[in-house]
């Protein structure tokens, strides 16, 4: 039986998703319906206390095992829920680039980082068709609940590829479409099959699937050969 808490979470997500990016087409390769961008009204949903239990981000990061000193892009960082946790993992020798389409999200992220005394996070304004990251510098580009919102997924993937180090990885953390018990709107979920189809079409190679999270799965891809 679905708990009351889960129903509230799903309702909150539904309310939080404002049609910020007007264009909501279908992916040209997979036919997937592209989701609307979560507006800044969803910021409180991103930092809800229940997120720890519902998504277990600390377990996600443990499963990712990001080495100290890594350079990580948290692309579509929102208010930096993951960015700040990753900043602590990579430490002062590492760096986090946090990007988002919405300046207000990045403003909140900077305030949160400042309050937490975190100095190794740099915010970068995002774009619908470009990652805006330094070339060849990223060990990891992480997309947490973001890829399905890209209104120009092919252009984004091509641009993200430029930012990866030769052995860098693009990592998608997405709500499992295959699991009907995950209480998230369908267009905000991604299946392994769809993600592989779309990323392989842009030259990415599927590396591995990491399971074990309550609602999400982690898909790791190698960038296109350059
Ligand atoms: C559902 S929120 C997830 C935020 C954050 N990753 C987290 O898990 O807390 C999706 C975020 O992706 C951002 N976004 C969507 N498309 C983007 C793009 N092309 N470039 C940068 N940010 C983008 C949105 O503005 C929104 O803040």
Image (tube, grey):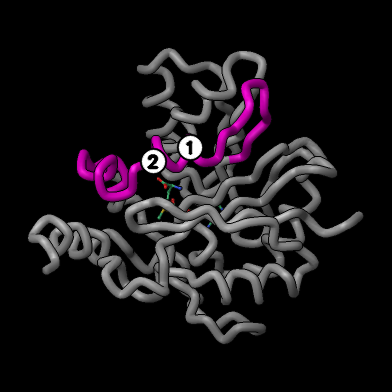
What is the quadrant of the C terminus in the image? bottom right
Q: Residue furthest right?
A: 226
Picture quadrant where residue 117 is located? top left
Determine which of the numbered discs, if any, sits on residue 61 in the image.
Answer: 1
Residue at x 37% of width, y 26% of height = 112
Cβ of disc 1 within 8 Å of ligand 1? no
Height in image: 76 above or below 69? Answer: below
In the image, the segment drawn in magenta is: 44-73
Picture quadrant where residue 147 is located? bottom right
Residue at x 74% of width, y 74% of height = 201
Height in image: 220 above or below 153? Answer: above
Height in image: 28 above or below 21? Answer: below
**Residue 211: % across, % down:** 47, 55
What is the quadrant of the N terminus in the image? bottom left
Q: Is residue 33 left or right of residue 125?
A: left
Q: How many residues crowd around disc 1 within 10 Å: few (fewer than 14), some, or many (20 or more)?
A: some
Determine which of the numbered discs, if any, sits on residue 57 in the image.
Answer: 2
Q: How many residues crowd around disc 2 within 10 Å: few (fewer than 14), some, or many (20 or more)?
A: some
Cβ of disc 2 within 8 Å of ligand 1? yes
């Amino acid at each position: 039986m679905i708990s009351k808490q889960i129903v509230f979470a799903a309702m909150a997500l539904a309310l939080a998703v404002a049609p910020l990016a007007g264009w909501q087409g279908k992916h040209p390769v997979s036919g997937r319906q592209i989701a609307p961008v979560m507006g800044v009204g969803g910021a409180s949903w991103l930092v809800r206390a229940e997120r720890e239990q519902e998504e277990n981000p600390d377990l996600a990061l443990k499963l990712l095992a990001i080495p100290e000193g890594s350079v990580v892009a948290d692309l579509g960082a929102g208010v930096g829920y993951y960015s700040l946790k990753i900043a602590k993992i990579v430490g002062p020798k590492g760096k986090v680039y946090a990007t988002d389409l919405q300046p207000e999200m990045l403003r909140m992220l900077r305030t949160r980082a400042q309050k937490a005394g975190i100095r190794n996070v740099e915010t970068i304004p995002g774009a619908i068709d470009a990652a805006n990251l330094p070339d060849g510098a990223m060990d990891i580009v992480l997309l947490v609940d973001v890829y399905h919102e890209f209104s120009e997924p092919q252009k984004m993937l091509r641009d993200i590829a430029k930012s990866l180090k030769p052995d860098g990885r693009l990592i998608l953390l997405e709500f499992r479409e295959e699991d009907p018990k995950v209480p998230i709107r369908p267009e905000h979920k991604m299946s392994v099959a769809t993600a592989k189809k779309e990323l392989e079409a842009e030259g990415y190679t599927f590396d591995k699937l990491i399971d074990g999270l309550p609602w999400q799965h982690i898909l790791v891809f190698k960038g296109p050969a350059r």
